[in-house]
Amino acid sequence: MAGQMNHSDLHWITNFIWGIADDVLRDLYVRGKYRDVILPMTVLRRLDAVTGPTLQRR
């Protein structure tokens, strides 16, 4: 089915995001609190990517 990620791709993306968290958020947040920052930022970025073409047409 088109649009589905295989397990390998999902694992790579997950590791990539957590790698950024380790590099950028270290010393700003306790490691256990990363998810409080990463999840909202990931959702916001995804919304931006999805609505971007719509906003550019206006």
Image: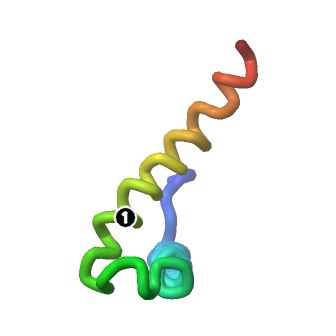
Q: Residue at x 48, y 86 (%)?
A: 22
Residue 1 versus residue 52 in the image, above or below? below
Q: Nearer the viewer, residue 46 or 5?
A: 46
Horizontal and vertical percent for residue 17? 51, 75
Horizontal and vertical percent for residue 32? 25, 82
Q: Is residue 34 left or right of residue 46?
A: left
Q: Nearer the viewer, residue 28 or 48?
A: 28
Secondary structure found at label 1: helix
Residue found at the far front of this picture: 28
Horizontal and vertical percent for residue 36? 29, 65
For disc 1, the marked residue is: 37
Residue 22 versus residue 49 in the image, above or below? below
Q: Is residue 20 left or right of residue 31?
A: right
| Amino acid type shown at disc 1 | Val
Q: Nearer the viewer, residue 34 or 50?
A: 34
Q: Is residue 55 left or right of residue 17?
A: right
Residue found at the far right of this picture: 57
